[in-house]
Amino acid sequence: MDSLSVLPFILDTGCLLDFGSGGGLPGIPIAIMKPDLRIDLLEATRMKCLFLKEMVKVLELNSVAVIHSRSENLVIQPKYKQRYGRITARAVAPLPSLWASTCELLSTDGKLIAFKGPEYESEKSVPVESGIELKVQEVKLPIIEGKRVFVMVNHVSRET
């Protein structure tokens, strides 16, 4: 349910990067619910990548690719620059580090969607550079009666 709570903020088509995918959350549940969306699962750990590849194969998720790499290697490859309309990140890094690692991968109108918990208050007060917009959205989780906080960051203006 937690992974699917992000669906209202995800595009139906285009490309999404699940940054630091780990066990495939939220990328794999999103792929199941949005089959027309191209999803790349970025993971630096080889064993986790092997697991993700097996899950993609077993679930027949034809629009999902597993990328075994670190973000700093991804951003220097031209094919990934400004490729993604949405980037999700769940339990990966503090917001300033996360933004620094992903901002070049976002399309001109793309958004980074960081899954955050109760600690988000300290992160949302982090000063952001000019030309950046930060929005906090709280979502109630059904069944488990919890809440999820999404911190969404995007470029307000970008020279291309």
Image: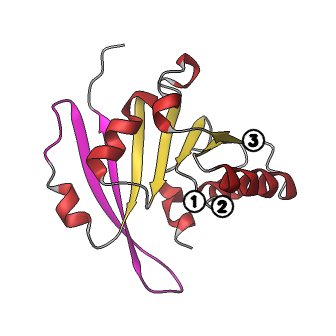
In the picture, the disc for residue 29 is: 2
Query: Disc 2 or 3, which lies upstream in sequence?
Result: 2
Q: Main secondary structure of the magenta part?
A: strand
Dot 1: within a 10 Å radius of its alpha carbon, few (fewer than 14), some, or many (20 or more) residues?
Answer: many
Q: What element does badge 2 sit on?
A: helix
> Does residue 127 sit above or below 48 in this rendering?
above
User: Disc 1 designates what residue?
Assistant: 26
Identity of the residue drawn at 81% across and 43% down: 62
- Say whether residue 152 is visible: yes
Going by the numbered disc 2, the residue's amino acid type is Pro
Residue 108 versus residue 32 in the image, above or below: above
* Numbered circle sitting on residue 63: 3
Residue at left offset 53%, top offset 17%: 78
Out of 102 and 137, give the one closest to the viewer.
102
Cα–Cα span, label 2 and label 3: 13 Å
- Report the quarter where the C terminus lies: top left
